Amino acid sequence: MSKKAINKASGKSPRLEDLSEPVRGLVENKRIWGRRRVKEWLQLLTEASSFDVALEQIRNRAGKFRNLSAAATVVLAIVAVLVEEPLLLWLILVLGPLGAAVYFGLRKWNLDKQDVSDDFRKVIVPLLKLLQEDFHPNGQLHLRLDIGGLTKEKILAERNMPPGKFSKVVLTTYADPWCRMKAPLANGGQLLLNVENIWSRERRRWRNTNGKFKWKTKWRKVVRVTAGLIPDSRFVFDKTLAEAVAKRYRAAAPQAGEDEAGKGTRKFRFRMVRVRGREIGKLSRRFKFKGVNEQPQDTVTPEQLAGMFFQMAGMLRPTGKRSHAS
Amino acid sequence: MTDWSTGKCHAKAGLLFLRECGNPAVNDCHFCGRPICLEHQIALPDGMACPDCAVREDPEGRFGGNAADRERDRERYYRDHDYSPDDSDDDDFSEDDYRAIDRTRSPEVGEGGDVPASPEKDDLDHFMES
């Protein structure tokens, strides 16, 4: 029976020591960069994903037990006071659940320190699996990942806003560029990808009718994706088509009804850029998400990212052929 | 007519750009005779099938596995994104293409510490700044 299976059966938290060296480094430092084959990246990130999923389950369970124990402590303390039992019984009744609450609280606090952002396992791992056969099997995929989530270092700006009807409004903006990828394709081309989360947290303070100060937090998350495609030398971008797409996107407004669907609104931008003599299609999109009191957990889907590459690949035509439109 | 006597797998590979797999073939498809590798062979009750035939013969997806799922996903993606890839078997890449791939040197991997803002300013940095 493997260590993982034993841990699962006994409900023990997965241990960092059981992880392979690079995955342990990734979980401890919450970032990784380098060049590896796509299969090696997949192996590494899948192991990190499994660890994160297992850890999340244990953390959630610890959180539930902590809350239950805390609630039981309060209820039993009230009961103990009401029935005026001897001190020993009172101690057993109250200190038992109080101890459990402290134990589970500390356990969750410890596990929280190992928590990493879910984006890499929700977005990058499935995307790599999806495009696995497109990547060059022996090509070195260049990846830079930061899975630390929101930290103080990522605060871009924090300022007091005009309060209006509230007594205080504080707006904090975070910039989290968490993924950069350059991948050689099996056909000789290359894919480029940059994903950045821009978070804004608005904390509003007001006084309720009882005179107490209350806080409400609103979160907004904008996922900025920039995808690039360098075609192999047998293909070029159809300029007429590319210009038509670029023009259409310049005029496009956010799609109606998407907010209601909870999927966020989208904004597009497409243009051709030239880097080191090679023409690159550059497609940018923004995905917006909102949350009240809690950070929105939604993010861009791997299908949406693949769709961006489909869109650019659809603009290619073989070298030497005439434009679609001409 | 495609030459299937090369001993290589002729199943379709890729999503953005289709090509032939090219791995050593271990079997022939029971339905179309196409040589297929271990990764692309799908066991159906009648015999081994290539992903194309497996999806056609088993539309409900009772058999198969990753290769058949990939084939179904591929069709769904192409339909959803109104995309038709260039289905070229031509493996004639230019020197430029190979240089683009080979330029990535031996593994240069880091875990933790500070990610240098620009370990070396590469195409990706230029691309993002452009």
Image: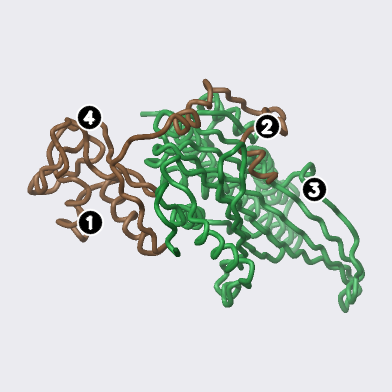
Chain colours: A green, B brown
Residue, far bottom: A209
In front: mark 1 or mark 2?
2
Residue A106 in percent (x, y) is at 69, 41
Chain hosting mark 1: B
Three-letter code for the amino acid on which mark 4 is drawn = Pro
Residue identifier under label 3: A155
Lower sequence index among marks 4 and 2: 4
Chain hosting mark 4: B
Give the CA distance from mark 3 to mark 4: 52 Å
Residue identifier under label 2: B121
Chain hosting mark 2: B
Disc number placed over residue B24 in the picture, else none: 4
Image point 41% across, 33% down: which residue? B94
Q: Secondary structure beneath disc 2?
A: loop
Q: Which quarter of the figure is the C terminus of chain A placed in?
A: bottom left
Three-letter code for the amino acid on which mark 1 is drawn = Gly
Residue B32 in percent (x, y) is at 11, 47
